[in-house]
Amino acid sequence: MPYSYKILTLITLFLLSSCNFNQVMINSIDKGNYSISFDSSVPFDLNKGIKSAFNFSNENDAKSKAKIYIKDYSFQEYSIYAGSALRSLEGEITAKFHIKIENSEKAQDKSVEIVKRYKSNELNPFSEKEVIKKVKENIYKEILDEIIREVIFFEM
């Protein structure tokens, strides 16, 4: 009897304590403290998306505590041929860029490469162009997520 009482008490305490957990807030960065600069290789759509994610305007540049540099962006498409068909079966899109975050105390450099594959054996060439367009949008979203992730790691 005392053994089952201890197990029942342990289970009850575990259930009561597990109801006390809260959601973790991940996006804790102060986006107004960053100055963002790009080189000419970064596409306009990505440039606009990053600036909107960090609420960047030219007035924020003077009072920023840290700087984010995004440079050496490259975008490559590669077709993968296989089998007896004269067309490619798959395509691969690779985006590479270099990010540097620095403030008065520390600096962090990182090269990032994002690779996505897609099926290219469509009969309609317009649908293949739309697939490539969607893959590019997904890559831009992943780049933005990676930049935000790097900024969060930099603040830790």
Image: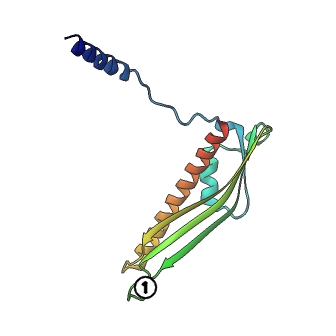
Q: Quadrant of residue 102?
A: top right
Colouring of the image: rainbow
Q: Residue at x 25, y 16 (%)?
A: 8
Above or below for 114 versus 33: below
Above or below for 8 versus 138: above
154 or 137: nearer the viewer: 154
Residue 144: image location, x then y, percent: 58, 51
Residue 42: image location, x then y, percent: 67, 61
Residue 43: image location, x then y, percent: 64, 62
Above or below for 91 versus 11: below
Residue 45: image location, x then y, percent: 60, 59
Q: Residue at x 58, y 55 (%)?
A: 143
As helix, strand or loop, the secondary structure at mark 1 comes to loop
Q: Residue at x 72, y 63 (%)?
A: 40
Q: Amino acid at mark 1?
A: Arg
Badge 1 is on which residue? 87
| Residue count near mark 1 (Cα–Cα under 10 Å), binned few <14, some 14–19, many ≥20 | some
